[in-house]
Image (tube, grey):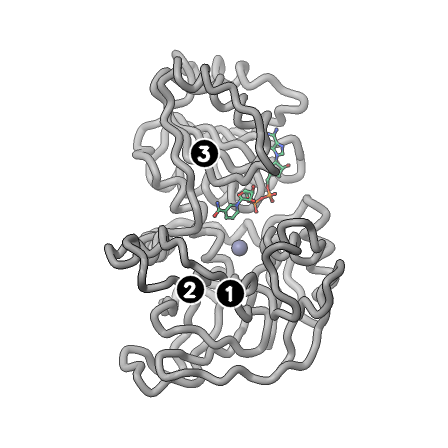
Amino acid sequence: MKALVKAEPREGLWLQTAPVPEIGPDDVLIKINKTGICGTDIHIWNWDDWAQKTVPVPLITGHEFAGEIVEIGRDVDDLQIGQRCSGEGHLIGKHSRQSRAGKFHLDPETKGIGVNEQGAFAQYLRLPAFNVVPLPDEISDDIGAILDPLGNAVHTALSFDLVGEDVLITGAGPIGIMAAAVARHVGARNVVITDVNSERLALAAKVADVHPINVAKEDLNDIKAKLKLAQGFDVGLEMSGNQRALDQMVEALVMGGRIAMLGIPPGKSPVDWSRIVFKAITIKGVYGREIFETWYKMIAMLQNGLDVSGVITHRFHVDDFEQGFAAMKSGKSGKVVLDWR
Ligand code: NAD
Ligand code: ZN
């Protein structure tokens, strides 16, 4: 089969021929139709410090996928051949207290496909049946291939009650944009999204009913005045990983404001903790998605009118994967989807 492999410990990925994986009694074999390129895959392509410390070589990369079940392990009795599916790419252990309490997304033994284990950038993927998420007919393979990052957006956005709230999202990357659409869908009053990249802010405004603010050129206080926010924003969703964005968010929040933080700051970053204490702000770190409650909720929202299709800006056949990665690396794209058929 074709697979996009981190074949050597240096910059790049290589389209190679690899054996079709063999499945165990509790696994399924999925024929991959579409995959999404994630920021994580760019780190692996670039072979940065994190990737060098984390990723074994050689490894088939990729973790965002949609496909169809073509083989079922002996002990799997709840899935059918031909079933369209996506799936959770975090492979959880069964031993930790968190797992045994059903809090699978908090399991410290978690391994990721395409990061620690063979991934989904291939014509076939072996996955534990437990991780499979069947796709209803109305969810396309394109959307199926971006459910993993949509799940990050949904898990973050649903961290706090957003009904009637004024929400500030910092970072209009694909996940920030999808979080904006989710916040509107669940009933936020105003959603303001910030970035320093005007292409991405334009995309945000196309995908969701939000107020885009370029903080490199505009003052966030102006939109607070325009929207007549008495004090500031009730809830912040940090989706940039940028220290200045976090500081700006802390300043822009009301007393007692709440922050859900998905963005990953590079290294240790200085934070003005006294501001957080005196404003009595709650900060929740968010990792991954809830397994499987986020999957349940996002599929239900997609069936009930949530539309994030506009966040996919580029589609390529896998043979042209280099163009797909170049689009992602430009920093101007939304999601980039590769076709494996
Ligand atoms: P992205 O890098 O595509 O988007 C981040 C955006 O933030 C960019 O558009 C960038 O221009 C913008 N930005 C930079 N400086 C800013 C500033 N001062 N103010 C506002 N915006 C600014 O990332 P993404 O794929 O959308 O993911 C969002 C974040 O979530 C990233 O930090 C990513 O590493 C992180 N992430 C975390 C998890 C997790 O499990 N915690 C999972 C996936 C992604
Ligand atoms: Zn991802």
Asked whether the viewer can see residue 271, the reply is yes
Residue underneath mark 2: 91
Please, what is the three-letter code of the amino acid marked with disc 3? Leu
Q: Nearer the viewer, mark 2 or mark 3?
A: 2
Q: In which image quadrant can residue 332 be found?
A: top right
- Residue 39 percent coordinates (x, y): 60, 51
Mark closest to the chain's N terminus, 2 or 3: 2
Q: Which residue is mark 3?
A: 237
Question: Label 2 sits on what residue type?
Answer: Leu
Q: Are marks 1 and 2 in contact (CB under 8 Å)?
A: yes
Quarter-wise, where is residue 12 in the image? bottom right
**Residue lying furthest bottom:** 74
Q: Which residue is mark 1?
A: 113
Residue 326 is labelled as none
State the SS at label 3: strand
What SS does tag 2 mark?
Answer: strand
Identify whether 331 is placed above or below 127: above
Q: Residues within 10 Å of mark 3 (few under 14, many from 20)?
A: many
